[in-house]
Image: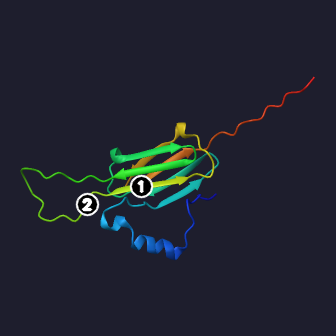
Amino acid sequence: MFLVPFARRAALSRSLDHFFDPAFFGAAPSIPALDLSEDDKAYTVRLDVPGVAKEDVQVAIEGRRVSVQATTRRSEDKTDGPRAVYRERQVRSFSRSFLLPAEPSSADASAKLENGVLTLVVPKAVPRTVSRIAVN
């Protein structure tokens, strides 16, 4: 089983892309790392989205394309109690889109977010059977 990349890149080119990645400067979404596995019945995708609440994750399946978007929230300052003196943590967004090897059955797909890892289980489509009709 393989993941169909949008474009093939050499390892050096990919590391240079990360070095000049606008996400480093807070201008663009981060690309979360993912693992894709399959068994006879489903594809399982695991994506790293640290600091994201499950309400802030959106997953869309359109044909073979799976798209995931997520955003972290910034905690609001309270009027009473402790106040922020210094902040380094920023609002971050994650975005990833990829193609599955075959069209899935998205009707029974499920998603679970636990410990910063989003796990998607997308059932495989049931193959269509071919009916043969005898000609008299």
Disc 2 residue type (three-letter): Gln
Residue at position x 18%, y 64% in the image: 87
Q: Is residue 129 above or below residue 135?
A: below
Mark closest to the chain's N terminus, 1 or 2? 2
Write down the residue under mark 1: 95
Q: Residues within 10 Å of mark 2 (few under 14, many from 20)?
A: few
Q: Is residue 37 left or right of residue 83?
A: right
Dot 1 falls on a residue whose secondary structure is: strand
5 up-or-down from 42: above or below:
below
The residue lying furthest to the bottom in this view is: 12
Q: Residue furthest right?
A: 136
Seen from the viewer's position, the closer of residues 41 and 95 is 95
Q: What amino acid type is highlighted by mark number 1?
A: Ser
Q: Is residue 9 left or right of residue 49?
A: right
Residue at image coords 50%, 74%: 13
Estimate the x, y position of residue 135 in percent, counting from the top left.
90, 26
Q: Position of residue 97 (x, y in %)?
A: 49, 53
Q: Which residue is mark 2?
A: 90
**Residue located 58% across and 51% down the image:** 100
Q: Quadrant of the N terminus?
A: bottom right
Query: Which residue is nearer to you in this view: 108 or 3?
Result: 3
